[in-house]
Image (cartoon, rainbow, N blue to C red):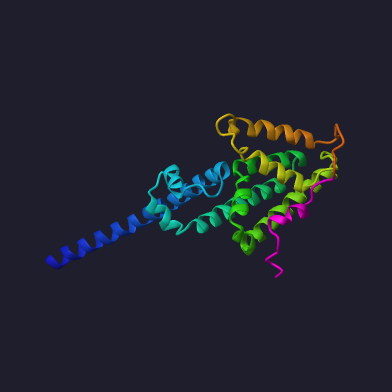
Amino acid sequence: METKQVGACSSAIAAGIRAAAPRLRKDATRNRERILAAARRLFADEGADVPLDEIAKQAGVGNATLYRNFPDRTALVHQVTLSVLERGLERAREALADPGDPFEAISRFAHGAADEQIGALCSMLSEHPVLRDDEQLFATRLEMERVVEELMARARAAGVLRPDVGPGDLLVALARLTRPLPGSENCLGNEMFVRRHLQLFLDGLRSPARSVLPGRAATLEDLRPTFPADPLTR
């Protein structure tokens, strides 16, 4: 009888451990996502050298939780950069898969990229140049650029995109519009204007054009200095 009770007790404990494990995994995943979201927002607003303590505070987790997920700043910056690129790529692919109005597809991608705070990429790559040689980051960025280029080529062929703009124009505008101007935190609310000014910019991309743009269309090659050497071909 005693043996049966011990066995039943052990089974109950084992069942409890199995039930707790998925919860722990869910909590850990949720904490990691909260850290990445807070870091992405703060990197976009304040630069990639924002104190890690502030990231943990904004994420609602302790410092130990942050360091358990990301042992140092470089690991966190790498993962945030990859996350922004992957989510931007996902938005671009979704837009390209839409068989509807090709200009509306560009607009959807642009607003989606703004949601992902793609402007954070500039500070992360400029302040942490070691990331420029990362093959995974480079390959993901290259694929996102390819899909954006295809999006714009489709709209241009349909006659709804002005012919004198390139994918570089769109990506640079997105980076600028989704990152606050230096020193503007006390006088300008960036969140208040991002959507409004992004839509103004998109309206300016429509064909027929109402003006002649100075210079030439910005190509993806114009953006290459961010990655001065292609790690995929070395």
User: What residue appears at the point 73 percent right and 52 percent down from the top-left corner?
Assistant: 223
Name which residue lies at 69% across and 58% down. Answer: 227
Q: Residue at x 60, y 43 (%)?
A: 117
Residue 223 included in the magenta stretch of the image: yes
**Residue in view at x 79 percent, y 51 percent:** 219
Residue 12 at x, y percent in the picture: 24, 59
125 left or right of 11 in image: right
**Farthest residue toward the bottom?**
234
Q: Nearer the viewer, residue 72 or 1?
A: 72
State which region is magenta.
Answer: 216-234
Determine if the magenta segment contains residue 233. yes
The quadrant the C terminus occupies is bottom right
Task: Tell me residue 194's x, y (percent).
Answer: 64, 34
107 relative to 2 in the view: left or right: right
92 horizontally vs 77: left or right: right
Q: In the drawing, does residue 182 fall left or right of residue 96? A: left
Q: Position of residue 137 (x, y in %)?
A: 62, 59
Image quarter in which the N terminus is found: bottom left
- Would you say residue 98 is visible in this rendering? no
Q: Position of residue 38 (x, y in %)?
A: 49, 45
Count of numbered marks:
0
Rendered position, 56 above or below 203: below
Most prominent secondary structure in the magenta stretch?
loop
Quadrant of res 99: top right
Q: Is residue 183 above or below residue 82?
A: above
